[in-house]
Amino acid sequence: MAKREVDIVVLSDIHLGTYGCHARELLQYLKSIKPKAVVLNGDIIDIWQFNKRYWPATHMMVVRHLAGYMAKQIPVYYIPGNHDEMLRRFKNFRLGSLKITNKLSLKINNEKIWIFHGDVFDVVMQHSRWLAKLGAMGYDILILINRFVNFISEKLGHGKISLSKKVKDSVKGAVKFINKFEDTVCDIAIENNYDYVICGHIHHPEIKKVTTKEGTVTYMNSGDWIENLTALEYNDNAWKVYKYADDPVAQAIDVERKRHKKDTAKAMMASLMQEFNITNNLSHESPEAA
């Protein structure tokens, strides 16, 4: 199958290591494209809720696929989010074509693009971290309940529903938070003369032009791989929101494979380390503290 070429793909809020992560669908998407650059914009591996007893093969396969870009010398930028914030202390760390950075500024066709996760503008994150983590646990439980509900719904001949999305859409406070988040991001982007600003964090895919008395900026959010299964793609001098639900080509890709007894997450990680010679490379690199 010929892969679809994409200049830049931006992914965020994958939350590998949680029950809500749609790793299989993400892997199908990744196998359908041939990107020239990849931006991982935070919350890729959910360290907050990471459980060594839950790490399916598909989650490891996603990690291996992303690492494969490094082997092909495709630039990969990792911008940590709040759920993988421990990686922020490795700011400016490089390993082959991988670079960890807390924010990314690009210039394409003389237009300035500002990319960062976005949790810095979350008041709950700043002042009540314990409450944010408690909310994340509740969110994961809701996802488990959602799976059971969808199992029954499909047995009855009905389609899938997203309880978390319905809750968000029905709570005025959530809508108000999203609007305030977007307004704050756009105000700062305009103040710093950016033409585009790209975020993740709020799981709300979007592309819209925002105009204030100070200027105009295009706001974009890559969404997530929990509820929306979306990404941002830049190709042919234009940005768009990619939606897995609208991509029959990706949906048709078979990612299943026979697993051997030794094909565990631990064995796959060891194979990954050996394949990219990471152990030896790390001895020549020194992380820079943020």
Image (cartoon, helix red, strand yellow):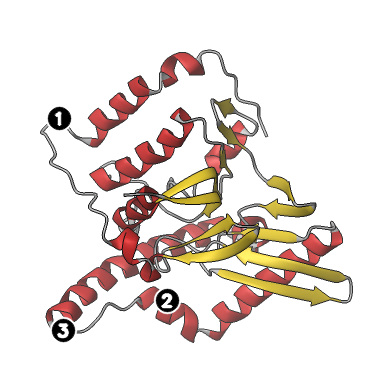
Q: CA distance from mark 1 to mark 2?
A: 38 Å
Q: Nearer the viewer, mark 2 or mark 3?
A: 3
Q: Nearer the viewer, mark 1 or mark 3?
A: 3
Question: Which numbered disc flags the more N-terminal residue, 2 or 3?
Answer: 3
Q: Report helix, strand or loop for mark 2.
A: helix
Q: Residue at x 52, y 51 (%)?
A: 6
- The amino acid sitting under disc 2 is Lys
Which dot marks residue 157? 3
When asked about the image quadrant of residue 142, the answer is bottom left
Camera sees residue 126 = no
Return the residue at label 1.
262
Q: Report helix, strand or loop for mark 1.
A: loop
Please, is residue 267 above or below residue 149 in the view?
above
Which dot marks residue 165? 2
Please, is residue 45 above or below residue 118 in the view?
above
Q: Report helix, strand or loop for mark 3.
A: loop
